[in-house]
Image (tube, rainbow, N blue to C red):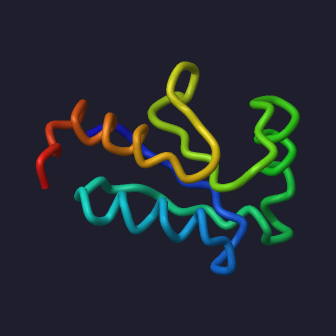
Amino acid sequence: MTEVMVYSTGPACQRCRLTCRRLDELGIRYDLIEIHEEHNAALRTYLVDELGYVEAPVVVVGDGRDNSWAGFRPDRIDALASRLGLAGR
């Protein structure tokens, strides 16, 4: 199965919670990484400086080269579910 990573700024982030809820509803497995934690400072730098994202969550699918996004994007989540054969749930 395709690896999905969700980089979150923590439980207070409404867009992060909505993203995780939608992924859960569609049965898409993902790893949740809390980037606000100090030991993840290098990840924050990578997401901002290398990938150019400035809002959370950041969702990275596979190697992320052509399939990543920031914010709550139900359209992108639904398209991912369709690609993974999980649409219609």
Q: Position of residue 44 (x, y in %)?
A: 81, 51
Q: Position of residue 58 (x, y in %)?
A: 63, 47
Q: Is residue 48 left or right of residue 34?
A: right
Q: Is residue 70 above or below residue 16?
A: above
Q: Residue at x 46, y 36 (%)?
A: 61
Residue ranking furthest to the top: 66
Q: Residue at x 83, y 40 (%)?
A: 48
Quadrant (top left, top right, bottom left, bottom right) of the C terminus:
bottom left
Quadrant (top left, top right, bottom left, bottom right) of the N terminus:
top left
83 vs 5, nearest the viewer: 83
Q: Is residue 14 above or below residue 49?
A: below
Residue ranking furthest to the front: 75
Q: Is residue 25 left or right of residue 60?
A: left
Q: Is residue 45 left or right of residue 40?
A: right
Count of residue discs: 0
Q: Is residue 37 above or below residue 84?
A: below
Q: Position of residue 84 (x, y in %)?
A: 22, 36
Q: Residue at x 56, y 33 (%)?
A: 68
Q: Position of residue 73 (x, y in %)?
A: 50, 46
Instruction: Answer with the quarter of the image where residue 16 lies.
Output: bottom right
Q: Is residue 79 left or right of residue 6?
A: left
